[in-house]
Amino acid sequence: MELDEVLRRRRSVRSFSPQDVEPEKVEALLWAAERAPSAGGLNARHFVVVRDRETKRRLREAALDQSFVEEAPVVIVCCCDLKRIRPYGRRGVELYTIQDVAASAENILLKAVDLGLGGVWVGAFREEEVKRILSLPPHLRPTAMICVGYPAQP
Ligand SMILES: Cc1cc2nc3c(=O)[nH]c(=O)nc-3n(C[C@H](O)[C@H](O)[C@H](O)COP(=O)(O)O)c2cc1C
C-alpha cells in the first residue's frame, strides 16, 4: 500500500474480529518495529509478543480493564532496554530509549494497516504489574502495548 494511503487509513482499532493473525504477519510487524531509528543504533528496546489468553486477561487487568487488550489476538508489549541505553547516561534512560520504543510502536501500527490489520497503542497500564506478569528482568521497562488484530469492521 502507498505510504500516504497507510497514513490516511490508520486510526485506533479497539474492536477485533475473532480471526487470528498469521505468524508471518506478526513477524512482519516485528520487522517494521526494528526498522525504526534508534539512538546511536543501539536498539535499546525489546518486544514481547503475547497471544496466550490467560496472559492477555492479566494484561487487561493491568491496563485498567481495557477489554480490547484481552480481545486482541496479538498484544505486543514494547519495552525500553535500560541496559543497552547506558552509554547515553541519564538522557538515554529518560529520553532516548522511550523515543526508540515510540518510533517502533508507530511503525508497528503503520505496518498493521499495510497488512490489512488494525491496532491501538495502549499506554495506560500499571508498569510493575506488567513486569510481574511477563517476568521481565529489571532492565526492561514496558512503556507501550500495541494490540493488533483484524478489525471487526472494515
Ligand atoms: C502514548 C499513547 C498512549 C495511549 N494510550 C491509550 C490507552 O491506554 N487506551 C486507548 O484506548 N488508547 C490509547 N492511545 C490511543 C489514542 O487514544 C489515540 O491514538 C487517539 O485518541 C487518536 O485517535 P486515532 O489513533 O484513531 O487517530 C494512546 C496513544 C498514545 C500515543
Image (spheres, rainbow, N blue to C red):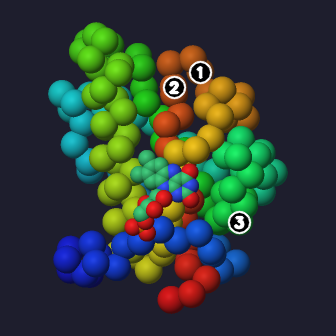
Question: Could you tell me which residue is drawn at 59 percent across and 69 percent down?
Answer: 14
Tell me the quarter of the picture where residue 93 sits. Answer: top left
Query: What is the residue that sits farthest to the bottom in this orientation?
Result: 154
Query: Can you identify the residue that label 2 sits on?
Result: 140
Question: Could you tell me which residue is drawn at 61 percent across and 83 percent down?
Answer: 152
Query: Can you identify the residue that label 3 sits on?
Result: 71
Q: Calculate the distance from the C-alpha at mark 1 to the C-alpha at mark 2.
A: 6 Å
Q: Of marks 3 and 2, which one's residue comes earlier in the chain?
A: 3
Label 3 Cα crowd, 10 Å radius (few <14 / some 14-19 / many 20+): many
In the picture, the quarter occupied by the N terminus is bottom left
Label 2 Cα crowd, 10 Å radius (few <14 / some 14-19 / many 20+): many
Is there any visible trace of residue 21 in the rendered image?
no
Q: Is mark 1 within 8 Å of ligand 1?
A: no
CB atoms at circles 1 and 2 under 8 Å apart? yes
Q: Calculate the distance from the C-alpha at mark 3 to the C-alpha at mark 2.
A: 25 Å
Q: Amino acid at mark 3?
A: Glu
- Disc 1 on helix, strand or loop? loop
Residue 67 drawn at (x, y percent): 72, 61
Q: Amino acid at mark 2?
A: Leu
